[in-house]
Image (spheres, helix red, strand yellow):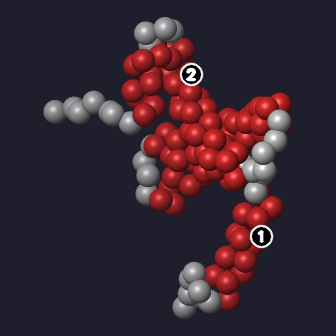
Amino acid sequence: MNQPQLDLVAVLVVLSGLLFSPAVAAVVAPYLVIFLGAFTGAFFALGRRAKESRLAGLSFFARVIGLALCITVPVAVFTAPYLGITQERYLFAPVAFAIGLIGDDWPHVAAWLVEFVWRWKKGGPGGSNG
């Protein structure tokens, strides 16, 4: 028996199909998932920032959500095989959320990643070079 897919993208395809044609809904729904994931992550990231004007907060949301809309799909497509995930759309929400959560802290994330890779190559904590 063929079970229906109940992931967030599939649900939003059905819901978007109420407003758009099925073909348009199939395109809009994944980006709606990305938007919602990035928006939620950015909401938490905004809470870490110093109090600022509404315009600055809106600019932050636009910047972070725009970045998520641009890079979530390539990141999901690249990482899905390494995680053993057959459909990259399962990663859209978590990847977009992570991008939103990182917000403007990309320099810190890049420094952490370089240090992690360096330790892994050296066989230290975080991995062994057996």
In the image, which disc is placed on residue 111? 1
In the image, 51: left or right of 35?
right
In the image, which disc is placed on residue 4? none
Residue under the point 42% across and 18% down: 15
Give the spatial CA distance, label 1 vs label 2. 35 Å
Residue under the point 33% across and 34% down: 6
| Residue behind mark 2 | 28
Q: Quadrant of residue 58?
A: top right
In the image, 70: left or right of 31?
right
Residue under the point 40% across and 29% down: 10
Residue 63 in sight: no
| Residue 128 in the image: above or below residue 89 | below
| Mark 1, secondary structure of its residue | helix
Q: Earlier in the sequence, mark 1 or mark 2?
A: 2
User: Residue type at mark 1?
Assistant: Ala
x then y, percent, for residue 8? 42, 34
Q: Residues within 10 Å of mark 2 (few under 14, many from 20)?
A: some
Residue under the point 52% across and 25% down: 29
Quarter of the figure that contains the C terminus:
bottom right
Question: 18 and 59: which one is in front?
Answer: 59
Q: Do the residues bearing badges 1 and 2 touch, measured as CB atoms within 8 Å?
A: no
